[in-house]
Amino acid sequence: MDRQRILIVDDEEVNRTILEGMFQEEYDTVQAANGQEAMDRIEENPNFVLILLDVVMPIKDGFDVLEYLKQSERIERIPVIMITGETIRSSEGTAYEYGIADVIHKPFYPDIVQKRAKNIIELYQNKLYMEQHLKEQEEELRAKEKKIRENNEFMIETLGSVVEFRNSETGEHIRRLKYFTRILLKYLAKYFPKYGITPVQIDEIARAAALHDIGKIGIPDAVLLKPGRLTEEEFELMKTHTIIGCDLLEKFRNGQSDEFYRYCYEICRYHHERWDGNGYPDHLAGDEIPISAQVVSIVDVYDALVSKRVYKDACSHDIACKMIEDGECGQFSPDILECFRLAKADFFDIVEVVKMFSFV
């Protein structure tokens, strides 16, 4: 097993020899006669466990070496003991500001230098071990969290696809809805910071959007798949999918964060509410409607318009946008409508890509 290595930096050979004699039994030692040589030795092999550093040296002094260690971000990993004949307090203060481990004044006592050096080496080695251990634990935790997210994503898309399968849709509606939701939220975060939308919230709301129609599982086929216009009674039954969906979500709540569950619930229950209070099921109006539901509401309407359904043909992108902006599909908030206008070109690109691949 390779022995640990110490760098001894001093312009006086006698001092280097004395220091080497103190440590050569336990450590390999490398010598440097000035600061420039020290920096060269560190570049050649940065795995020193300790640097014993003189202050006053030709070419490059001890403070030049400390500046180099600081700039190369090595000062946190390699402990430095400054060995100096000076007793100027300001110099010591400057050295500690760089992050050195200790200062020893000449003339030094070998047994004291050895003990202090060994203690510092052990302290730094334990610190580096703990940092590495914590890093590995964090990486392991992130890997587990990623796996959980992937499993959740699979379950969410599976549940959403069950609804689409019953609804005789292609299975693309959920994926498009997530894309549209993410795009609209990015515009909302950029142009309307008052909502405080963060990248994490964008991700969670977009994932939660996949469950917006999960309650349709509980709607009879005769109503869900009816090719013609629904009767008043049938429409009232269809509207209950928002409530049924929330009941189902409660059964799948375990394992989900409170915030993610809240987005799922808000979107499932309120994505048919309208800004003027003429939506359902609770006739919320204005800012009573959670922003997550407002976003999914408008993108759901857009996707429904540009998609072929059992009861209608697909509208063109331009017609769908005009219908939404003219209020033909219910009222949306001015902020959401503005973001929709900004996102129209992005939505069109997604629809065209889907069309292109549907023929492949």
Image: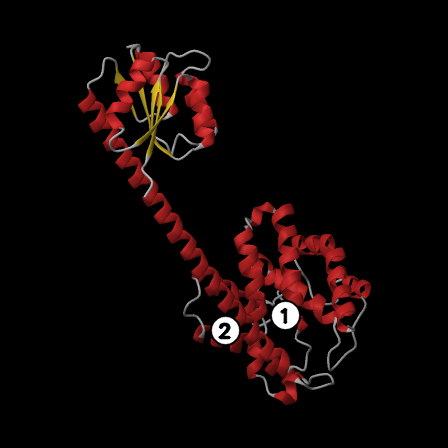
Mark 1 lies on a secondary structure that is helix
Type of amino acid under label 2: Cys
Identify residue type, mark 1.
Ile
Q: Kindly identify which numbered label has been placed on residue 246.
A: 2
Discs 2/1, front: 1
Residue 1 horizontal side relative to residue 64, left or right: left
Front-lying residue, 76 or 304: 76
Q: Is residue 85 above or below residue 123?
A: above
User: Which residue is pictured at 43% across the width and 53% down the height?
Assistant: 139
Of the numbered discs 2 and 1, the one sitting upstream in the chain is: 1
Is the residue 138 above or below the residue 244 in the image? above
Q: Which residue shows up at 74% across the image and 70% down it?
A: 305
Q: Residue furthest bottom?
A: 222
1 up-or-down from 227: above or below: above
Residue 174, numbered circle: 1
Image height of 266 relative to 99, above or below: below
Q: Identify the mark at residue 218; answer none if there is no mark.
A: none
Q: Are marks 2 and 1 in contact (CB under 8 Å)?
A: no
Q: Position of residue 187 (x, y in %)?
A: 65, 51
Q: Quadrant of residue 24?
A: top left
56 on left or right of 68: left
Q: CA distance from mark 2 to mark 1?
A: 18 Å
| Among the 4 quarters of the image, the one containing residue 124 | top left
Q: Would residue 318 be visible to someone looking at this image?
A: yes
* Residue 249 percent location from the top left of the image: 48, 73
x and y percentages locating residue 115 in the rendered image:
20, 28
Does residue 240 appear to the left or right of 113 in the view shown?
A: right
Task: Return the residue nearer the eye: 81 or 277.
Answer: 81
**Quarter containing the C terminus:** bottom right
Q: Residue at x 35, y 49 (%)?
A: 133
Tell me if residue 288 can be seen.
no
Q: Residue at x 61, y 61 (%)?
A: 294
